[in-house]
Image (tube, rainbow, N blue to C red):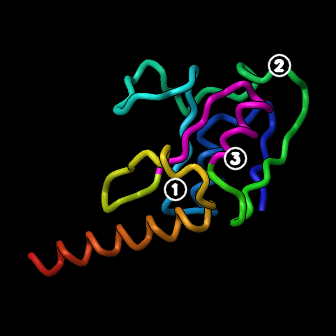
Amino acid sequence: MHLNVQKINPIFEIQHQFIEAYPFLKLEFFRFPQRKQPLSENVVIKPVNDIKYFDTYYCNWKINITKTRTLQQVETDLELLFGLYALIYRKAGTQWIATGMMSDYTLQQQNEEGRKQTDKLLNKRKLAA
């Protein structure tokens, strides 16, 4: 499984490919490394921007996002290839939470954890209604 990235791709197309593979994970791009949460809006790269504004090479890329890769490996690949800082978020109910402290987990582990947390929260709401 790969993210297929071309220079003409807007960020949202890359994000869409990622969330199709991992529906309980989300990929965000930033101009600078992000350490603090919550993030200010001015550091997030808008999804309508094309990769060509950030990538100085004239290549198309395939980024490995197989289920055994860790969050850190994928984030590092994106940084090395495009010079963009990426963070992967996990869904928890209706919110997205940063996974920074869990960057050594695999994409599959984080996606499954997101599925469990979301199901648990949605079931609680159904019972309360």
Is 82 included in the stretch rendered in magenta?
yes
Q: Where 112 falls versus 37 (above or below)?
A: below
Mark 2 vs 1, N-terminal side: 1
Q: Nearer the viewer, residue 13 or 33?
A: 33
| Left or right of 59 on screen, residue 12 | left
At mark 2, the secondary structure is: loop
**The magenta segment:** 72-89
| Left or right of 46 on screen, residue 9 | right
Residue hosting label 3:
74
Mark 3 against mark 2, which lies toward the viewer?
3
Mark 3 vs 2, N-terminal side: 2
Q: Amino acid at mark 3?
A: Val
Extreme bottom residue here? Answer: 127
Question: Where residue 34 sits in the image (x, y, percent)?
Answer: 50, 27
Residue hosting label 2:
56
Separation of marks 3 and 1 at Cα, in angstroms: 12 Å
| Left or right of 59 on screen, residue 50 | left
The residue at 72%/37% (across/down) is 78
Residue 51 sits in quarter:
top right
